Amino acid sequence: MSAQKTERLLNLVICLLSTRQFLAKEQIRLAVPQYADCPTDEAFDRMFERDKEEVREMGIPLQTGSNDAWFEDEIGYRVDRAAYALPEVPFEPDELAVLSLASRVWQQATLAGPASRALLKLKAAGVEADDASLAGVEPRVGTSEPAFEGLYAAVRDRRPVTFPYRAGRAGQVVERHLEPWGIVSWHGRWYVVGHDRDRGATRVFRLSRVAGPVTHVGSPGEVVVPDGVDIRSQVAVLAQEQPRGQATLWVRPTAGVGIRRRATAERRGAAADGWDEVLVGFSDPESLAAELAGYGPDVVVAGPEAVRDAVVRRLTAVLETAS
Amino acid sequence: MSSPGSATERLSRLLAMVPYLVSRQGIPLTEAAKEIGISEVALIKDLELLFVCGTPGHMPDDLIDAEWDDGHVYLRNADTLARPLRLGVDEALALIVGLRALVEVPGLHHRDALERTMAKLEAAAGDAALTSAQVSVEVEGESEVLAAARRALAGSRRLHLTYFVPTRDETTERDVDPMRVVLMDGRWYLEGWCRRAEAVRLFRLDRVVAIEMLDVPADVPSEATARDLDAGLFVASPEDIVVVLELDPPAHWVADYYPVESVEDLPDGRLIVRLRAADTRWLRSLVLRLAGAARVLDPPELREAVRTRASDALAAYR
């Protein structure tokens, strides 16, 4: 089925690329064998209209016009060859190597197909990549979040969206309305940034917390990205929390290796029983408390009280659940 | 983006592949398939389709002539399609955003090539390049350790690592013969032959406490093969222990964040997840972090370990 359609569309493209004249619909019907099989004029008309639309959506510049100024009512079609062809930009072997590495960034991700197709097109000049010097380096980005495709398309087409979003510690899901400006992979996670219609302000959303389908609302081009907005720094500012306090911990000797790795100071044997005193910065007492509770009896919080109380409350809850 | 497997998706590929093959008459079939990013079977199907297409008239002379019988691909009579179609928005964006991500890769001594390539690519893409400002991939700069790993790779030298293992909360010392460095999900990894484990291992570079290049040539055994990372970083082993957890809504993120084997939704909003672990110490720690929002259903020893750890920890505050 699909192979037949590909064949028909390919013949249509070849037919319209090979003509300098505008071809009338009836001429096209004769030239593309698959159209000859159409049982009725209506069936052909419907099929041709759909095919034209799909060819245009692929980015093929299909022109309509008339060959003869005296008979303007007879509309014909052709593909503008100059607009069709990729401009001839000669890439050097080392540049192709860099491009090939750039395309592999998307390996297994949503944009893998477009990336390798683009590379193929750029290699059509016949030059081979020289990537010996890039061997052994493989940056890749994943797009495993199901919301990626919908939000990427919305950003690309500048369409407003709505999506269910899981927020806060309680994890309740609320439908959000967003004019998306950009999509950013930051520290391995995808975020979308834009104008939040519910809050009337700029907000950042993590794609992994989108809890259902992304719905496009409004028409393409409707979203206006403000001039000079830097989506990368927006995400960096809104997604990252600055340390606001410092906690003092007593850590059993040789234990707590993980928490020591981000200590601002460490004094061996400075606490009771030869334990070590370790200082760490934190922004949210709850998330620090969660991390510290994970160490069980190997880490004791000396202060501040907010962190200490949070650890005690969390461990008490664990004990109640487990008993 | 046309949906994968659709007629237009395939047509896009055909229009990109024809100019490529025309410029490389006689390219081995295997190499062509690899470059195009499809299987050899799919490539032959594509060639068969091209074979019956051509300029109007459809006499044999008008059709594209594709030949691949001797394992080499020849494509003739395809002049109409000899130039590639302009880059589409998705295509331009994929390469431009990929290039920008490379600019941030520390120790990649190709700044000059990157800049030249970007300028040419933007020229070739034209308007299709405009959207690319709205998509960005940030690459973390683990500059010191990554640069050392890259130097060892380039010079084919052995490395000594002091490496933090969070699941056991300890640091280990080991010698590693580097095979490659990989960025996955925003983090850099070194893959290499670990002489302690006598196996291929992945090391997360942000967990490398110290790295030293040894005056010993790297010696990666011939049986060492790089891991196929497409399926993800985590590989469960049959000897691993099966752990079953019950998660209240505040702990549901665990099901997304860790490689779980199965997830079961309970009507009251709780989840039952099964996962495998070689060492359950990290799971004990995870349950302690979750403030009672997770219960260990199995194994009982793990449940007991969580209870003991919580109770011992609380004793220090009384």
Image: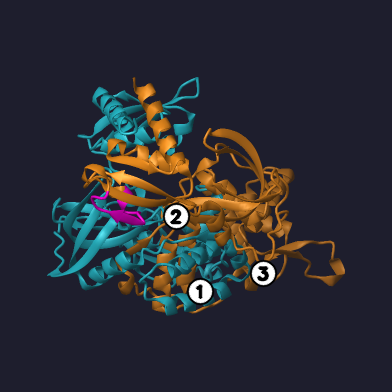
Q: Is residue A287 visible?
A: yes
Name which residue lies at 44% across and 55% down: A187
Q: Chain of mark 3?
A: A
Stretch in magenta: A259-270
In primary-sequence order, the first of circles 2 and 3 is 3
Per the image, label 2 sits on a secondary structure element best described as: loop
Mark 2 residue type:
His
Which chain did the renderer colour cyan? Answer: B
Which residue is tagged 2? A187
Numbered tag placed on residue B212 in the rendering: none
Numbered disc in front, either 2 or 3 = 2
Q: Chain of mark 2?
A: A
- When asked about the image quadrant of residue A320, the answer is top left
Mark 1 residue type:
Met
Q: Are marks 1 and 2 on the same chain?
A: no
Is B284 left, or right, of B38 in this rendering? left
Nearest the viewer among B287 and A218 is: B287
Numbered disc in front, either 1 or 3 = 1
| Distance (Cα) linking label 2 and label 3 | 44 Å
Mark 3 residue type:
Asp
Q: Are marks 2 and 3 in contact (CB under 8 Å)?
A: no
Q: Position of residue B137 (x, y in %)?
A: 49, 60
Label 1 neighbourhood size at 10 Å, few (<14), some (14-19), many (20+)? some
Name which residue lies at 26% across and 35% down: B280
- When asked about the image quadrant of residue A221, the answer is bottom right
Which residue is tagged 1? B118
Which residue is tagged 3? A80
| Distance (Cα) linking label 1 and label 2 | 24 Å
Nearest the viewer among B239 and A52 is: B239
